[in-house]
Structure formats: structure tokens, C-alpha cells
Image (cartoon, grey):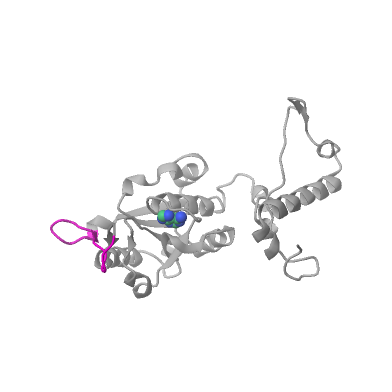
Amino acid sequence: MTRSDMAWTAQILTLFPEMFPGPLGASLAGKALKQGLWCIETLDIREFAGNKHRAVDDTPAGGGPGMVMRVDVLARAIDAARKKARDEWPLVCLSPRGKVFDQAMAKAWKEKGGVTLICGRFEGVDERIFEAREVEEVSIGDYVLSGGEPAAIAVLDAVIRLLPGVVGDPEVLKEESFEEGLLEYPHYTRPRVWEQREIPEILLSGDHKKIAEWRRKKAEELTKDRRADLWGKRDGPDGKEGTK
Ligand code: ADE
């Protein structure tokens, strides 16, 4: 198999390789992994320490609390990973300082055929690595995790479910949240009445045009109500930005 027709690949640089595949070994992603629809390569950053004590971190220049991941160790790990990667695979460090991951990024990464993810630990990573190896920082939201590993699992899950053959019915992907910049409409199933709560009448009418209109309206209301940021970014009916 050549590199171009190999399965979508997640390369992960971490101090905790035992965290992978973790939840990605179960359910939809796990089944797809077993089927060879994607593959995972973990590299243990500690293997690249190259010193007697296998130290991967050191105290911050200028003082202060915590430890910083060493640039020389990380560079060796990145260089080893990238030798096995294709140039178009994004090279990303998970960090709360990064650009926030979204569905558009998931789609873009899917198209690239793979990704190299660096999971930071300690207080951070020596800043020089970002420019020297053109590493992009990506966050999964405005909160601080104990390391990049859970964030890597989250972003990978978002990409893997987009790969062909992973989700049984690809129609599901067309109607979900963030398609057309909207949150997804509400869902119902049997029983028709539960604790005096009924399924909205329109959904039982069989009128597909009316149902589509109702769903659209609900999706818009939810988005306006919960996510003013998304609502403001949408293209209006006349193609102009925002329909507040
Ligand atoms: N590492 C620690 N916190 C993170 C976050 N919010 N996103 C990505 N990586 C992280």
C-alpha cells in the first residue's frame, strides 16, 4: 500500500500512550478502527529524551511554578513522526491557547488523510517549537484540561465519524448540528405520550414539507437563543452576513 491510499491516520505524540485508543477503541470509532477505516500510531515522547534521567521537562526560564516541556526532546519526537507522515497532514499541538476546534476543522482534517497531534503536559511547551516546526495550536474550548490527551480524543472522534463507511447512514451527517451554521432541531420517538408530554402534532402529520419547515424554525430558534455567536455568523437570505 502506498501512503496515498492508506487509511486515515492519527499520529499521536504523548507521554501517556496507554491513554490511546481509549474511548476511540469502542463504539463507532472502535468498530471503524477494527475494520481498518482509520489507524492510530502513538509515539512516546519520553523515548526521545536522550538523557540519562529521561527528563522531558525542566523549570521555566524566568522562574514561576510548574514545568515546561523541553524543545529539543519534542523536536526529536516531531521529526520522527513527520518522517512517517505525509506533508499535508496538519501538525497540531492541543493547548487551551489554540484556535478553537470546530466542525469546519474536522472536515478539513478529514480531507488531509491524517493528522499529527502533540499532547502537551505540564505548564506548557517551550514556545520555540511552534515556529521552528510550524506547529499550529488548537483548543477544544475555554477550560483547562490536565493535558492534551482528552482533547486529542475529542477532535479525533469528530473527524473519524466523517470518514466514509464509519456512520451507517451518511444522511445523518447532513442534518446534524453546525450544518448550515445551525444547531440541530429537537428529536422525538415513541411513546407518543410520556408523563403527559406529547410529541408535537406536526411530526405525526405525514406532511414532509411542513415538518421540514417546523424543524428549520426550531433549529433557528435554538441557535438564536443559545449561540448568538453562530447566529451572527450565518449568511442571511440575501447572502449578507448575519440575520439578527
Ligand atoms: N490542554 C489543556 N486544556 C486544553 C484545551 N482546552 N484544549 C486543548 N488542549 C488542552
How many badges with numbers are in the image?
0
Q: Is residue 43 left or right of residue 201?
A: left
Part of the protein shown in magenta: 48-64
Residue occupying the far bottom of the picture: 132
Q: Residue at x 77, y 70 (%)?
A: 239
Is 20 in the magenta? no
* Image vertical order of residue 140 relative to residue 79, above or below: above
Ligand 1, seen in the image, is in the quarter at bottom left
Q: Quadrant of the C terminus?
A: bottom right
Is 53 in the magenta? yes
Q: Position of residue 175 (x, y in %)?
A: 69, 50
Q: Nearer the viewer, residue 21 or 102?
A: 102
Q: Could one spot residue 7 in this view of the protein?
A: no
Q: Residue at x 71, y 40 (%)?
A: 187
State which quadrant residue 207 falls in. top right
Q: Quadrant of the N terminus?
A: bottom left
Q: Position of residue 116 (x, y in %)?
A: 40, 61
Q: Residue at x 82, y 50 (%)?
A: 213
Q: Could one spot residue 58 in this view of the protein?
A: yes
Q: Nearer the viewer, residue 124 or 6?
A: 124
* Image vertical order of residue 242 relative to residue 41, above or below: below
* Image vertical order of residue 205 relative to residue 181, above or below: above
